Image (spheres, rainbow, N blue to C red):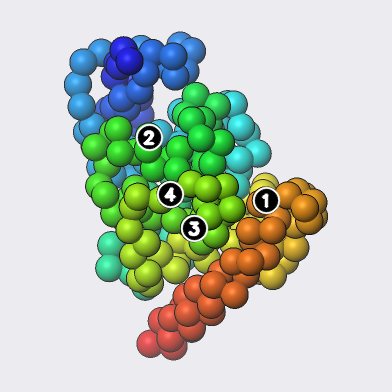
Amino acid sequence: MDYLQLSVVSNRHEYVLTCSRAARPEGVRCYGGGMSGDLVGWAEHAARLYLASTLPQRWQHVQGVVRQAQAAAGLVDDSDLLIASAWLHDIGYAPELDRTGFHPIDGAVFLEGQDAPARLCGLVAHHSCARVEAVHRGIEIDWLDEQTPLRDALWWADMTTTPTGERTDVRSRINEVQTRYGLRHVVAQSVAEAAPELLAAAERTEGLLGQLAHR
């Protein structure tokens, strides 16, 4: 496949993406180079490039998840990684990156192609208990599910954000997903099966947030 570099310039920083020519968003200039810039800035501009114009509601959701992740940044060992994973967790929904029809894997594959850290790829691949849906779809996840407070915080941020970026609670979000897809859909079935793990991750995160608030 013929690959090229995509350059996004903002606030005097240049962020570089690698993709196939078929996946190039219209109007983006190309040149040789590699991944550069700070991780959070690169993640934000990658997400903006692939989601803001083609999937505006998804982009609203992503921005809301980032706000929640920022609120939990003090809980984790690498706040930049948490914020970057929040920006990128749904990038696999971009039509240009759709390979399997399962956005956590498509996003992780894209990031791996950017030489992104393996830990970031794993967070995206496993976000919000994606393992359960992957089993239903017959898809293997090759990246590690790290099972850390950072991973919990990403799941919490995603599952406490509505499709349009507002705050919600995990049970309401699970109900919303089931209503939106219909109970027979694989997504609805998977989120119901994953509910205990999603709720447990949220409970752990909110417990740590409570401890942080009382310091």
For the residues marked 1 and 4, what is the alpha-carbon distance in whole angstroms? 16 Å
Near mark 2 (Cα within 10 A), the count class, few <14, some 14-19 or many ≥20, is many
Query: Between 159 and 28, which is closer to the camera in this rendering?
Result: 159
Q: Amino acid at mark 1?
A: Val
Q: Marks 2 and 3: CB-CB under 8 Å?
A: no
Q: Earlier in the sequence, mark 1 or mark 3?
A: 3
Q: Marks 3 and 4: CB-CB under 8 Å?
A: no
Q: Secondary structure at mark 1?
A: helix
Query: Which mark identifies residue 140?
Result: 4
Q: Nearer the viewer, mark 3 or mark 4?
A: 4
Q: Earlier in the sequence, mark 4 or mark 2?
A: 2
Q: Earlier in the sequence, mark 1 or mark 2?
A: 2
Q: Marks 1 and 4: CB-CB under 8 Å?
A: no
For the residues marked 3 and 4, what is the alpha-carbon distance in whole angstroms? 8 Å
Q: Earlier in the sequence, mark 1 or mark 4?
A: 4
Near mark 3 (Cα within 10 A), the count class, few <14, some 14-19 or many ≥20, is some
For the residues marked 1 and 2, what is the alpha-carbon distance in whole angstroms? 23 Å
Query: Between 133 and 58, which is closer to the camera in this rendering?
Result: 133
Image side of residue 45 versus residue 201, left or right: left
Q: Secondary structure at mark 2?
A: helix
